[in-house]
Image (cartoon, rainbow, N blue to C red):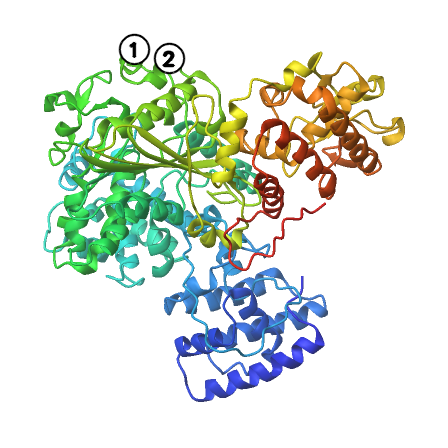
Amino acid sequence: MKLACSKACQRKLLSFAGDFRRLQRRQKSFREIADWLRERGVQNSRRLACCFSSGSKRIKPTGGWLCKAIWRMHQRRKRKARHTTTIGCRARAIEWGAERLREEGLSALLLQLPPRLNLPQNHACCANGLAESVPNVEIPQPQPLISAPALSLAIPRRGHVLSSVSELFGRPIREAVAMLSVSVARAGVADVTSALHSLRPCTHESPIHRSDDEFVAWLIVSMWITGVAARAIPVSSSLPQAEEWFLGSKKDHRLTTLVSARSIQEAESALRVRADAAAYLDLLPYILDPHGPGSRLSVRRDPSTRAVRSRKREEGVFYTPADVADYMANACVSAFVGDIPTILDPACGTGVFLRAVLGALRQHYPEEDAVSLAAKFLFGIDIDPLALDATAFVLLADIWTCTSVSPVALWKSLRRHLACIDTLRIDPTNAKPSTLFQEESSRVALSSIFPDLPHGPVIILGNPPYANLGVRSDLHALEGVFRTIAAKPQPNAEVYLAFIEQMVRLADAKNCAGALVIPLSIACNVGSQFTSARQLIAETPGRWRFAFFDREPHALFGEDVKTRNAIVLWSSNLDDKNAHLETGPLRKWHGDSRAQMFRSLRFTRINTDVRSGIPKIEGDCQAIAVKVLSSRCDQLEQALKDIGRCPLAALPNADDRTVFVGPTAYNFLNVFLKPSRKIFGKDSILSEHTLHVLTCASRQDALVVFAILSSHLAFWWWHSHGDGFHVSRRFLCNFPFGLDALSGSAAEMLACAGEALWSTINTRPIISLNRGRTSLAFTPNGHDSIRRQIDQILADLAGLQPAFIDDLQQFTAYTIAATWRNQENSRIDGKEGV
């Protein structure tokens, strides 16, 4: 990978660099220089590095710290040509520049992209700074000033993985905690206990064991991190100075007195490796996570993180990106006018949602004091006491500048509204306060935990744990409270479904709202738990809205957590007597259009039975089609002699009455008839994934079934009723066209269309190799006229609107392009790609 550009690009850059050099002679500050760069379209670190590295021959090394860093890169590039350079030289030069940038508090400008250099671990942040590896990139010509919003480090996007940048800043923090924890362990137990009790409430509820040494170490480090993030103390401050800022005039029970001076110095050195106020403020809920790295990508990079990932999966810990929390918080808060609502996060973790909802409250109630909003109206519950401490620090960093109250007093007031208890043990009815710390099987009243919530919170929102119920002593009690657990009273029952019930149970009955981000299974899984959850939704009065998100090309939680998700929004008041359901499509998007995707979310009212699933559709035309097709008695299973499974190797033994369907799909359903025997090579190792085998009564019936399943309508029906990946037997059996399509003129037209389509795609097999095994597919995409003809025949059979045919074609085109219908300046014209 090169840092230089083409000669033509270099000539442009030399002129660019000359202007920059003249700007330097005027002794402009770096902020002014950065503004000058942004006016000329240089808005990210990749272009910035490319500009200066290519133009560095005109910039002398005495021209400022930025030019010095680039000059070193330029010298390194010349040494590379003589094959005498080392990666450490470049890393040190980049590190030097990054340190100067952090001193200016502007590193967020250059941390918009992930690492692209293979640097040693102690220089990991360099890849996010000035010296990213840059291909031949053309630099735009000077443009008029275009204001662009600052990109938060807490929002995933193309080339920016939240877990990676969080680990960049989080690793030194955990290293400092580990150093302090070892030193605290040598102190007296009584001293540690008394120091802790003077700060934080006593907790006996958590199933997650944390030692007092760990609590003390995290508190000391969190004080320093919060002070730096809030710009209350400089990066050069020591840990005792940070504690003095936090505790104020309080002299007794200082935590840093429990740690040796040497350990404090080592911890401070570790913290200053990546110290950055702006980055800390963006990433505070993620870098204060005590778990550490444990994502899919972290395991690929470092297999030693597999244990942490397993623990996070077992506990259902998936920290939510900031934009997801912001969308849900604004959707809930904007529904209320008048009194300020009380808000509860039943699985608050390190405070991502409480931070988001605090921002929403400050927007909607600008006349209110931020400290009052946070201390009086925000409540959180979690089973990890360390996470609750971190939540209080996160909120403190956001509101500290708005008050003259000492940080420790404000932190304690925030911490009092954060309870360490299992949310599933809470009841909305009154209970004795003494039951809070009894045996695990006891039920607890919400008012006994939070006396300020006698009638329940007005808003409940969050990201419940995606974990199994596990072995519990109170399983019988839970079975009597939650119908989703009663449907499957086993250790492998899903926990997050009970959180939907808990949202409805605990909310204020007069006027309330809720929002949960959960897996997509709520819409399409037909298990007893999910059927029971959807039945509960259909019986609960209020407005229910569902937004669905695919995992490709990009996922809602970022590239490190590739899950398909749903955001469930609920609002209710005393006037609501029935449930009103609104849904949306299974959205696909690209990483650079994430913000536009959230702004484009719209919902469509549906009036169908959702016990078997929630259709993922868009627009009234599709809603009418779902209602019409769901009422049909005909099903594809009636038109088949048999439906089974077979491996790919069994294809040569099939006859011409057989239709094969791939077990998975994405942009098309893989439907085909018996292919040519010569399609595979002699030495090919075939995939062992079995195909669906649909056996028909005749060749004509097989052509009809092939045509039906190759249509736009079949792809839309699968996409709106499935999970966007698996093609299930249930989908094939219940597809709403059967014997009526196998008789009369409709059968003849469908057979002709099927023959024409197969004769076209039969010559274009898609043979792919995955892990040494060969798989086979045939795509109908690109043959729009034949598929439209099939759609028209099926629409006439079902009595669907003519406009639905155009809607189907547009649906396929938008799905393949991974965009949405109301996107501005869309170039999708309704024609699908191949």
Classify residue 275 as left or right of residue 43.
left
Counting labels gives 2
Q: Which mark is residue 602?
A: none
The quadrant of the picture occupied by the N terminus is bottom right
Residue 783 horizontal/vertical position (percent): 74, 42
Instruction: State the residue in front, 541 or 59.
Output: 541
Classify residue 776 as left or right of residue 447.
right
Would you place residue 559 above or below residue 688 in this image? below
Tag 2: residue type? Answer: Pro
Q: Earlier in the sequence, mark 1 or mark 2?
A: 1
Residue 803 horizontal/vertical position (percent): 57, 42
Q: Which residue is mark 1?
A: 476
Tag 1: residue type? Answer: His
The quadrant of the picture occupied by the C terminus is top right
Residue at 55%, 29% in the rendered image: 722
Residue at 61%, 53% in the rendered image: 828
Instruction: State the residue in front, 658 or 3.
Output: 658
Instruction: State the residue in front, 709 or 630.
Output: 630
Would residue 351 be visible to someone looking at this image? Answer: no
Q: Which residue is mark 2?
A: 489
Task: Decide: few, some or many residues near mark 2? Use Cα within 10 Å; few <14, some 14-19, many ≥20.
Answer: some
Q: Are marks 1 and 2 in contact (CB under 8 Å)?
A: yes
Classify residue 808 as left or right of residue 236.
right
Would you place residue 288 above or below residue 596 in this image? above
- When asked about the image quadrant of residue 354, the answer is top left
Task: Decide: few, some or many residues near mark 1? Use Cα within 10 Å; few <14, some 14-19, many ≥20.
Answer: few
Of helix, strand and loop, which one carries label 2? loop
Residue 238 horizontal/vertical position (percent): 27, 58
* Cα separation between marks 1 and 2: 8 Å
Of helix, strand and loop, which one carries label 1? helix
